[in-house]
Amino acid sequence: MTVNHILIVGIGGFFGAMSRFWVSQVINKRIKAKVPIATLFINLLGSLLLGIMVGLGLNGNLFMLLGTGFMGAFTTFSTFKLEGIQLHLDRRKKAFFLYNFFGYGGGILLAFIGIELGLLLT
């Protein structure tokens, strides 16, 4: 790994984190839900977009910028886990189950769909 690689990932990460913050703010202001819908939406969108990048065959610096940097900061596994634990501690079993089902299952499904879409676009 070179300094150039670190800068590329850092630049992508900066814009990914800023985008996640903006999307979260927009969603949380407009939608009131029983599950943390902003984090769920962002992670599902990120799964789809990352799948498309893989399907398109992005590699090298472009994948470091968009895949590792941007998508790594845009999606958030740590927040997803924390919000899931909060649902469990609040004894909101149905919300906890749905949040995890759609977060994990939907993420895998959308990543697969994204790969297939990316392959179709090449």
Image (cartoon, rainbow, N blue to C red):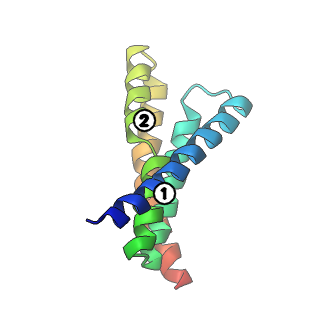
Q: Nearer the viewer, mark 1 or mark 2?
A: 1
Real-space CA distance between mark 1 and mark 2, rounded to the nearest whole angstrom:
21 Å
Give the quarter of the image for residue 82. Answer: top left
Which one is nearer the viewer's eye here, 116 or 57? 57
Q: Position of residue 35 (x, y in %)?
A: 54, 29
Q: For the point 44% across and 27% down, which residue is it?
A: 83
| Residue of label 2 | 80
Q: Could one spot residue 70 in this view of the protein? A: no
Badge 2 element: helix
Q: Residue at x 40, y 56 (%)?
A: 108
Labels 1 & 2 near each other (Cβ < 8 A): no
Residues packed near mark 2 inside 10 Å, few (<14), some (14 to 19) or many (20 plus)? many
The residue that label 1 is drawn on is 12
Give amino acid for label 1. Answer: Gly
Q: Is residue 68 left or right of residue 2?
A: right
With respect to residue 36, does 13 lie above or below? below
Q: Residue 81's x, y, as percent?
A: 37, 33
- In terms of image quadrants, where is residue 86? top left
Q: Position of residue 13 (x, y in %)?
A: 46, 52
- Residue at the spot 54% in from the left edge and 30% down from the top edge: 36
